Image (spheres, rainbow, N blue to C red):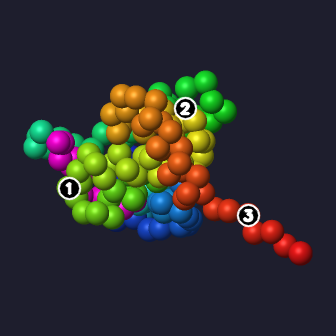
Amino acid sequence: MQCPSCRADECRVVDSRVAEEGTAIRRRRQCLACSHRFTTFERVDHAPLTVVKSSGDIEPFDRTKVVAGLAAATKGRAVSADTLERMATHVEDVVRLNGNEVSTAVVGLTVLDELRGVDDVSYLRFASVYKHFDAAADFHRELELMEKSAPRAVASD
């Protein structure tokens, strides 16, 4: 690691800590030449994630599009900006498990799964656009699917 002060190549690690909720390591370093102390962060460098659109076009994964879609679906609902960010991070993590190239269908279904666990109305809003609802019967059918997949409470004696 090169010292930002004198550009010497030799330094020692003084302290290491987990940072950014476990996604990085913070290292406090000291230059052996000038004794200047500085901080570095070590993170995983992910391979670029690309999205294959239904038209066949390929473009880089854009997390801001996921956040915008989540924000549109949750507009006016009691869902915080922090929750949207966590959901978008989880969507990116899940789709990354499918490899470096993922279809828009996988991204959309992953967003739907995230919304299902957060807010039913937001889920229906997103589903209506994603699944191209064009009649009230489409909403009714989706509500029936939600009710079937919802965990049921078990009555106890």
Specify the farthest residue to the top: 76
Q: CA distance from mark 3 to mark 2?
A: 26 Å
Q: Amino acid at mark 3?
A: Ala
Residue at 84%, 73% in the rendered image: 156
Tag 3 residue: 153
Specify the farthest residue to the right: 157
Q: Residues within 10 Å of mark 3 (few under 14, many from 20)?
A: few
- Looking at the image, is mark 3 or mark 1 nearer the viewer? 3
Residue 69 lies in the magenta-colored region? no
Q: Is residue 100 above or below residue 78?
A: below
Residue 104 x, y percent position in the rendering: 26, 46
**Residue 10 falls in which quadrant of the image?**
bottom left
Tag 2 residue: 74
Give the extent of the magenta segment: 43-54
Prevalent SS, magenta region: loop
- In primary-sequence order, the first of circles 3 and 1 is 1
Q: Amino acid at mark 1?
A: Glu
**Residue 122 falls in which quadrant of the image?**
top right
Residue at 55%, 26% in the rendered image: 75
SS at circle 3: loop
Q: Are marks 3 and 2 in contact (CB under 8 Å)?
A: no
Tag 1 residue: 101
